[in-house]
């Protein structure tokens, strides 16, 4: 008997941002080979990161047209549902100790590297190796204020979903007064940095008359300082039909590497029937686990999230 497909897992996969990765090298003498096509950086010799500007660029198409995900109906048929993303919340924390070396870099052979007088293995290791699973154990809730880092920026959307600006437009507006919202690198952020995206349904293909069954909304949480080992992705060994819609398939598969930012927590609103909560796929348990993760995270960062409070009380 075929395994039932999970609509929730498909949604989570298809709303995972995928951002172009960059590398900062620890030494200008690192031998990366004569051919860039055969060169593959490793964790011991470089630090991988993404820029926030690249993150927002990767969300441009979704912001303009919506993100699509396949939805399997109870009768076995499949339709495509589109969700409009909006910036629900974002908090950026930096570490003053890491800001200086992250900006003092030299350029050699078209690649950035850390000068020996700036690079500190102990300083950068937490931002390379910290996983979301270990984040809570490494951050002491009782002393959270000292562990979060230096708050650079935060934003929480309070307006009605019907009056919100598209995600990329909102970031553009906020960035006028906070340029770091677009210029900061992930290695300049502490693990307490995160964003939340609210996803509201806009239409289905083919169109459905019973709109109540397709009115579910989602709230996803994404780390902005992800673990390098857990989030590196490459098109090298992937099949194109397995890639989320925001993958840039025009680039060479053996050269293009990305950093994936999968949701580590989730809240949902207007979940009707078994479309997103099919007991045969384990969606209910998954949704409950991710909802608990969202609540735990907000307690860790000592934050009241308006959309989260609305989702869990309505």
Image (tube, rainbow, N blue to C red):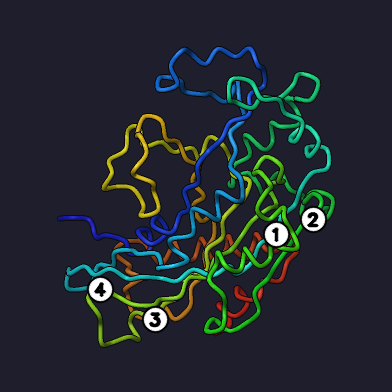
For label 3, the residue is 215
Number of on-image labels: 4
Mark 4: secondary structure: strand
| Contact flag, marks 1 and 2 (Cβ < 8 Å) | yes
Q: Up-down: is 18 above or below 274?
A: above
Q: What residue is shown at x 79% (from left), y 44% (from top)?
A: 95
* Marks 4 and 1, the one that precedes in the sequence: 1
Neighbour class for label 1 at 10 Å: few (<14), some, many (≥20)?
Answer: many
For label 2, the residue is 151
* Marks 3 and 2, the one that precedes in the sequence: 2
| Residue 84 appears left or right of 92 | left
Structural distance between the alpha carbons of marks 1 and 2: 8 Å
Q: Position of residue 241 (x, y in %)?
A: 26, 48
Q: What residue is shown at x 55% (from left), y 56% (from top)?
A: 56
* Marks 4 and 3, the one that precedes in the sequence: 4
Mark 1: secondary structure: strand
* Marks 3 and 1, the one that precedes in the sequence: 1
Q: Up-down: is 52 above or below 207?
A: above
* Marks 1 and 2, the one that precedes in the sequence: 1
Mark 2: secondary structure: strand
Could you say which is closer to the camera, residue 175 or residue 80? Answer: 175
Neighbour class for label 4 at 10 Å: few (<14), some, many (≥20)?
Answer: few
Neighbour class for label 2 at 10 Å: few (<14), some, many (≥20)?
Answer: some
* Marks 4 and 2, the one that precedes in the sequence: 2
Q: What residue is shown at x 48% (from left), y 78% (from top)?
A: 269
Structural distance between the alpha carbons of marks 4 and 1: 35 Å
For label 4, the residue is 205
For label 1, the residue is 91
Q: Quadrant of residue 74?
A: bottom left
């Amino acid at each position: 008997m075929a395994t039932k497909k999970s609509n929730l897992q498909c949604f989570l996969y298809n709303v995972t941002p995928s951002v172009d990765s960059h590398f900062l090298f620890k030494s200008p003498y690192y031998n990366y080979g004569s051919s860039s096509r055969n060169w593959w950086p490793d964790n011991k010799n470089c630090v991988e990161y993404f820029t926030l500007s690249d993150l927002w660029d990767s969300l441009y198409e979704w912001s303009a047209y919506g993100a699509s995900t396949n939805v399997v109906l109870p009768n076995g048929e499949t339709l495509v549902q589109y969700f409009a993303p909006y910036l629900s919340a974002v908090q950026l924390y930096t570490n003053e100790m890491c800001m200086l070396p992250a900006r003092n870099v030299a350029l050699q052979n078209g690649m950035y590297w850390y000068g020996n007088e700036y690079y500190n293995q102990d300083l950068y290791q937490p931002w390379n190796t910290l996983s979301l699973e270990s984040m809570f154990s490494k951050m002491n809730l009782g002393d959270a204020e000292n562990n979060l880092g230096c708050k650079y920026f935060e934003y929480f959307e309070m307006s009605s979903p019907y009056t919100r600006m598209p995600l990329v437009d909102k970031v553009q507006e906020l960035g006028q007064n906070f340029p770091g919202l677009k210029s900061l690198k992930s290695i300049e952020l502490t693990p307490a940095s995160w964003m939340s995206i609210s996803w509201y349904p806009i239409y289905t293909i083919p169109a459905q008359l019973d709109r109540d069954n397709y009115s579910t909304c989602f709230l996803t949480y994404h780390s902005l300082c992800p673990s390098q080992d857990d989030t590196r992705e490459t098109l090298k060994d992937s099949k194109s039909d397995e890639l989320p819609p925001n993958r840039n398939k025009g680039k060479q598969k053996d050269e293009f590497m990305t950093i994936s930012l999968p949701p580590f927590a989730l809240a949902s609103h207007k979940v009707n029937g078994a479309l997103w909560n099919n007991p045969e796929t384990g969606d209910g348990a998954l949704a409950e686990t991710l909802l608990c993760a969202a609540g735990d995270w907000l307690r860790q960062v000592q934050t009241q999230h308006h959309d989260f409070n609305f989702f869990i009380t309505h």
